[in-house]
Image: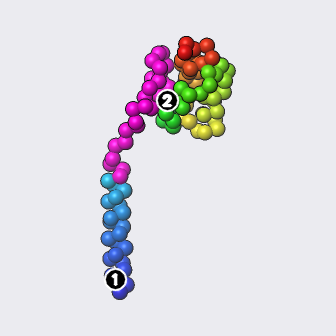
Amino acid sequence: MKNLQQRSLVIVGIVLASGVLVFAAEKFQLPPETAKLKPGPGAEMVTAQCLLCHSADYISTQPRLSRTAWTAAVVKMKDKYGAPIPTNNIPALVDYLSKSYGAEAPK
């Protein structure tokens, strides 16, 4: 009986390992609505840095923030939530966000 249980565990282990390998080999694609940032200088950087964690809709549905508020939001994402944003990219991100989604941006 013990030998049968060991074989069963080995088979279950192989099945689980196979499932993980199949899962790891799958490609995931974000839904199209997450790729709709306003065009402009810096949009590619925002796509690369911000859309890792949330959709473009999250950005576009924010209140029209001031440049200071966008700076605080980007710094918060980096410092509090661990977003992998290089410090030297913050000014360019804030430029795009404030020009495209800021208080003075065209509606």
Q: Where does the image place residue 61, in percent across and percent down from the top left?
A: 56, 28
Residue 56 is marked as: 2
Q: Nearer the viewer, residue 5 or 34?
A: 34
Q: Where does the image place residue 69, in percent across and percent down from the top left?
A: 66, 24
- Quarter of the figure with residue 34: top left
- Quarter of the figure with residue 102: top right
Say which quadrant the N terminus sits in: bottom left
Q: Identify the residue under disc 1.
A: 3
Q: Is residue 30 highlighted in magenta?
A: yes
Left or right of 89 in this view: 68:
right
- Quarter of the figure with residue 15: bottom left
Q: Which residues are magenta?
A: 23-48
Callout 1 secondary element:
helix
Q: Nearer the viewer, mark 1 or mark 2?
A: 2
Furthest residue in direction front, as rendered:
107
Kindly identify the residue that appears in the image at 33 percent across and 55 percent down.
21
